[in-house]
Amino acid sequence: MEVFLGVQQFIDNLLAYPLLVMLVGTGLFLTFRLGFIQFRQFGHGIKVATGKYDDPEDAGDVSHFQALTTALSATVGIGNIAGVALAIHWGGPGAIFWMWITALLGMCTKYTEVTLAQRYRVVNKDGSKLVGTVSGGPMYYIEYGLGKSFKPLAMLVAGAMILTAFMTGNAIQANTVSDLMNTEFAIPTWVTGGLTSAVVALVILGGISRIGRVTGILAPVMGLLYVFGGVVILAINYNGVFPALASIFTEAFNPTAGVAGTGIGILLQTILWGIRRGLFSNEAGQGSAPIAHSAAKTQEPVSEGAVALLEPFIDTIVICTITALVVLTTGVWKDTVNTELLMGDGDLSYTEEVDGRYQSVTGDIPAELRIDQGIPVTEENAGVMYSWHEVPVEQFFIDRDQTMPFTGVIDTKDGVAISALNQTQYKQLYGPAVENGAPMTALAFEQGLGDIGKYLVILCVFLFAISTAISWSYYGDRCSMYLFGKSSILPYKIVFVILHFVGAVAGLNTIWGIGDTAIAILTIPNVLALVMLSGIAKKLTDDYFSAFKPGMTREEYLSVARDRVEKHKSGAEL
């Protein structure tokens, strides 16, 4: 297992930075090639998404709105709650600016991949409730758009998507919920896992139509609920909103206020954390959302692309910004809270100060770290510091109330603290530490709204995780069908539900790593395909907007659309 994890970590480190460069570069390239389509046709996307031009006679399984909410259910989730906190923790407030930049570029990337997915989707005339009537996604536009010689690459993408669906889109979501419910309410993980597995099974066994109906309700409700809570907190802390926004812009180019990652002018750290969290929050370029949008009822690929460009805006520009402002205005990103500090696991790390910032120790960690009256003796510890969420802990206590300072050593090998007074061994101590991830956001909402805020975040984590698993199950089943045929869909869904339960009760460090690597493996060939097929995307775009003029009524739009379908059937060029 250690050899496997070592190989996985090597691949992940090898692909991490090229992946970020390729995603941003592709977004820039497509933005210029398609004439800033994400800005020019933003309003058209809203009109199509809200059903103004829906035609129930079109081929497909769900409406434009249901396709949008299915895709949003997969993207709006834990990343919006935890990912923003991670970006601020590591990159400072300025990281949010770079999240915005990636969202604006990601709008064009998502427009392109969804337009191509609609263009090359396959319609199954003998579809059923389980199988559906259409299939689409990156594997189809890679094979049919680039040619049969690229089918091995398409199969690699489909396989990586299935692995990502099992891991990141399913098991990790289940684990997040079960861990939170166990921490807050002492509910056994197997109980939570059994409940969420049953809910997921009930929805996904009904096929994409049921998934679309459920996410069509769940995604708007959970998004509005979360945003409403955030807006209330910002209204209460209105004096801090403009200073928070100002810090986002000033720290974007001259970062000075980071907690863990930034130090004195560490601009690259701020940019990288903003880009990383932005890209993986809205999933632009991963090739996942095109699978959901391929099921939309439409004959016009570009119309669904226009709907899809709304996703990064809703996910990152709106919801992530609400989270960021709540965290910044409440100040919890810099605050320390009374924390139980585990000596051997949890969010423990060992850091040292290098050039004004903290970084993980790369060499040998001292066997013992000495603590005197609660204060680390840095000189005797070779500069190595016990850290929680990568930030050094400045004081250690024996009791939860932090009234009895600890004196002794932390045994870094055995994961215990040994008292110098009586040689008592402690598996945990207590002290002031910063929060990170979802707990930081929960703390911000709790500070803004009291217990209501904390429970609001808990409810949203529950809903976000469930909806993400539901949507990702569909992504995986389309890939399973592509690789193994219709007969594989039911077995795939059964395995998906089983792994959901396993994820709820298991430790998932390994699964996190496998999922991240799978995402990189499916994303890199996908963005390369987008660049290679960008000429087709431009041709489709120019053709569509030359036929459909701004201000068209529903009747005029549908009339033109049906004429274009008839011309297409007759073999004429559209």
Image (spheres, helix red, strand yellow):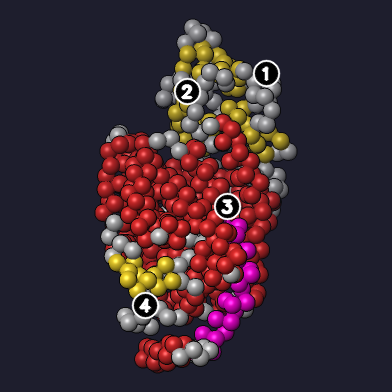
Say which amino acid is labelled 1. Answer: Glu
User: Could you give the CA–CA distance between mark 3 and mark 2, rounded to whole angstroms?
Assistant: 38 Å
> Do the CB atoms of the residues marked 4 and 3 lie less than 8 Å apart?
no
User: Could you give the CA–CA distance between mark 4 and mark 3, rounded to whole angstroms?
Assistant: 32 Å
Mark nearer the N terminus (4 vs 1)? 4
Tell me, for residue 40, which label it has, or none: none
Say which amino acid is labelled 3. Answer: Ala
User: Residue 389, position in %: x, y?
Assistant: 54, 36
Mark 2 or 4, closer to the camera: 4
Mark nearer the N terminus (2 vs 4)? 4
User: Residue 86, position in %: x, y?
Assistant: 53, 47
User: Residue 113, position in %: x, y?
Assistant: 53, 68
- Quick one: 545 or 368, which is closer to the camera? 545
User: Could you give the CA–CA distance between mark 4 and mark 1, rounded to whole angstroms?
Assistant: 71 Å
The local crowd at label 4, few if under 14, some if 14 to 19, many if 20 or more residues have their Cα within 10 Å, is: some
Mark nearer the N terminus (1 vs 3)? 1
Residue 530 included in the magenta stretch of the image: yes
Report whether 469 appears left or right of 544: left
Mark nearer the N terminus (4 vs 3)? 4
Task: Give the magenta range.
Answer: 520-547
Mark 4 or 3, closer to the camera: 4
> Do the CB atoms of the residues marked 3 and 2 lie less than 8 Å apart?
no
- Quick one: 23 or 84, which is closer to the camera? 23
Q: Indicate the secondary structure of the residue bearing disc 2.
A: strand
The residue lying at 37 percent from left, 55 percent from top is 488
| Residue holding disc 4 | 59
Mark 4 or 1, closer to the camera: 4
Q: In this view, does 312 lie above or below 517?
A: below
Q: Indicate the secondary structure of the residue bearing disc 4.
A: loop
| Residue holding disc 3 | 520
